[in-house]
Amino acid sequence: MESFFKFNKTNRQWHLPIVAGLSVGIPMILGWYMDNIEAGKLGSLAGLSILYIQSDKLIERMILLMTCCFGLMLSFSVGLLFSFNPMIAPIALGLFSFGVHYSLHKLQLTRPPGNFFFIMLASTAICSPFQPENIAEKIGYVAMGTILTCGIGLIYSLLTLKNNNQPENSIHRKSSYTNIIESLIFGLIMAFSLAVAFSLNIEKPYWIPISCLAVMQGSSSKHVWLRATQRITGTLVGLGITWLIASGNPTPLIMVISITLLQVIVEFLVVRNYAIAVIFITILTIFLSESGKQLTQDTNEIFFARMIDIFIGSVIGMIGGWILYNAKLLHHATMQLRKARILMKKTNRGTE
């Protein structure tokens, strides 16, 4: 219980949450100004890539940021392209999740947020209505958001890197076999969570795989269970606050400003106390996913729907986390994979 309310120490600099808020908020403000909030929301999704500036060297940081921006565009594009069929979508998301998890470990890009935002954007897009005539336009809005984010990242780096002499954190390298097994587990669980969401005919099915993914970000089996408990508890509180805000019929401008401030608060809290951060994550994600009119008119329906979605996703994430960090299961799977590779080598030699 102590760890549930404990504030963890972090070396994250205080100005990064502000920059993250600007990267997400500026596209929203531009969308509001041009009377196209939906375009602003798509651009703000790209702003999440600012959290991948994980190097203390300017050139490396910008290369990494641009690569991650391209990765987020690719994730969103894959989701849109495979949103045409609810039977194929879970398979596509599972394969994509496998590829993302495997590739990031190969490239040693495993520090938080890791694979989360790539799979999150793919999950969001793959659950959207299939509208082939609008795919290019939607990807374009995300692309414009990445360009803005890279510009903000460059300015931010030029202003702060000269005073940043923190040593690079060491990265724990996993064996190729372990990486394959973990990536397979991630892919299967994500596919299963989306299949469950579609089978339940949920209006916004992406809430289940995203909640599942968030819980599986834990660093151990115990941490996964803690994150699941924190997510469910924080979500309930966040939904209550969201209900109160929605009851006041906020204007679109207030919603846009709120999203910017909420992003700052979330990035400040998420590395310190996940349970409290989830309260604001819940408000932020509902503001981003629901239109202002629907939020104020269908508040109770949205409240209960999101509560059920997140509970189901968190339970699936707990099961996935248990499988992911089950030492005996991983060891057995790794040994079977090694045997299969040795057998294939012997077979190839025999045919030569």
Image (tube, rainbow, N blue to C red):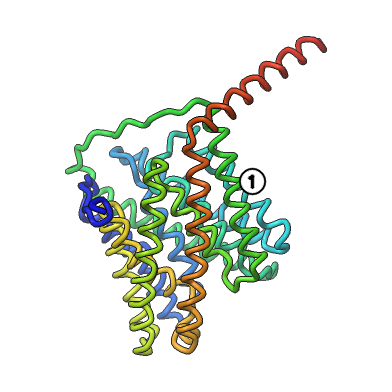
View extreme (front): residue = 1
View extreme (left): residue = 163
- Residue 231 percent coordinates (x, y): 39, 60
- Residue 61 percent coordinates (x, y): 35, 42
- Is 22 situated above or below 107? below
- Residue 102 percent coordinates (x, y): 54, 37
The image quadrant that residue 130 belongs to is bottom right
Q: Secondary structure at mark 1?
A: helix
- Is 215 situated above or below 28? above
Total residue callouts: 1
Q: Which residue is nearer to you in this view: 200 or 163?
A: 200
- Is 225 situated above or below 110? below
Q: Local crowd at mark 1 within 10 Å, few (<14), some, or many (≥20)?
A: some
> Which quarter of the rendering shows the N terminus?
bottom left
Q: Which residue is nearer to you in this view: 169 or 41?
A: 169
Identified at 33% across, 67% down, the residue is 279
Q: Going by the image, does 255 lie left or right of 211?
A: left
Q: Amino acid at mark 1?
A: Leu
- Residue 125 percent coordinates (x, y): 58, 62
Identified at 33% across, 57% down, the residue is 152
The image quadrant that residue 214 belongs to is bottom left
- Is 286 situated above or below 319? below
> Which quarter of the rendering shows the C terminus?
top right
Q: Going by the image, does 48 lie left or right of 161?
A: right
Q: Which residue does the numbered mark 1 point to in the structure image?
A: 95
Q: Which residue is nearer to you in this view: 117 or 205?
A: 205
Identified at 28% across, 55% down, the residue is 4
Q: Going by the image, does 42 lie left or right of 253?
A: right
The image quadrant that residue 168 belongs to is top left
